[in-house]
Amino acid sequence: MVTESDIPPEERAAFEEYVVRVGGTNISAQTLLATDYLNHFNEIVMLLDMVPDMPDMIEECKMWAPKSYQEHFADSTFKDKLLAVEAYDRVPSKFRRPFEETINHLNTLILGGVAKLEDEIVGGTDPALTAEHVKAISRAAQALMDCANAIIHGSDRAMAQVEIDGLLGGS
């Protein structure tokens, strides 16, 4: 549970107002974040996982683009999407900083991974090697999504770059 000392005084009043407003929704009263945002990343990971069996799926993957938290909810059918967008500006920096850092890592990983896989497919790389790269990218993306999910539920720790690199096997 978030304690008073966890939130700087200049953030506390706005946070507390929104804690009351998010009650009974799928938005965390502890952080003011919602896990629905992670669906944006689940979709691309599912597409990436299809690439080894259907290399032409890389074209679908290339159409994916990062979306900010607020853009995702503005475009979603999430029941409390307007509240999620409003509440984001009141997320305590204790959670917002590691959350945004994690999302930045995730976006970089996915965009770089899609580009690498496209180069491999176009270049005629051994499909087994491409399949291994897909697994590594998916595994790293899932670890970052797990980290983001933990932050949404009250953790204030982002993954370090060395941890992400370790998931990718140094590639």
Image (cartoon, rainbow, N blue to C red):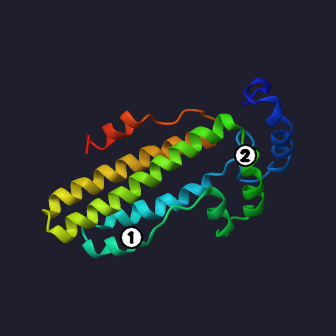
Residue 40 versus residue 107: which sits nearer the camera?
Answer: 107
Q: Which residue is mark 2?
A: 32
The spot of residue 53 in percent (x, y) is 24, 69
Q: Is residue 153 visible?
A: no
Left or right: where does residue 49 sit relative to residue 71?
A: left
Residue at 34%, 62% (x, y): give it: 114
Residue at 32 percent of width and 73 percent of height: 57
Q: Position of residue 29 (x, y in %)?
A: 75, 43
Image quarter for residue 149? top right
Q: Quadrant location of residue 61?
A: bottom left
Rendered view: 32 above or below 77: above
Question: Which residue type carries mark 2?
Answer: Leu
Label of residue 62 in the image: 1
Task: Decide if residue 97 is on the left or right side of residue 19.
Answer: left
Q: Could you say where residue 58 lies in the image, as x and y percent from the top left? A: 32, 71
Residue type, numbered disc 1: Lys
Tell which circle, 2 or 1, labels the residue nearer the N-terminal end.
2
Q: What whole-number distance in Å separates the C-alpha atoms at marks 2 and 1?
A: 31 Å
Q: Residue furthest front?
A: 10
Query: Which quadrant is home to the N terminus?
Result: top right
Is 25 in front, or is 158? Answer: 158
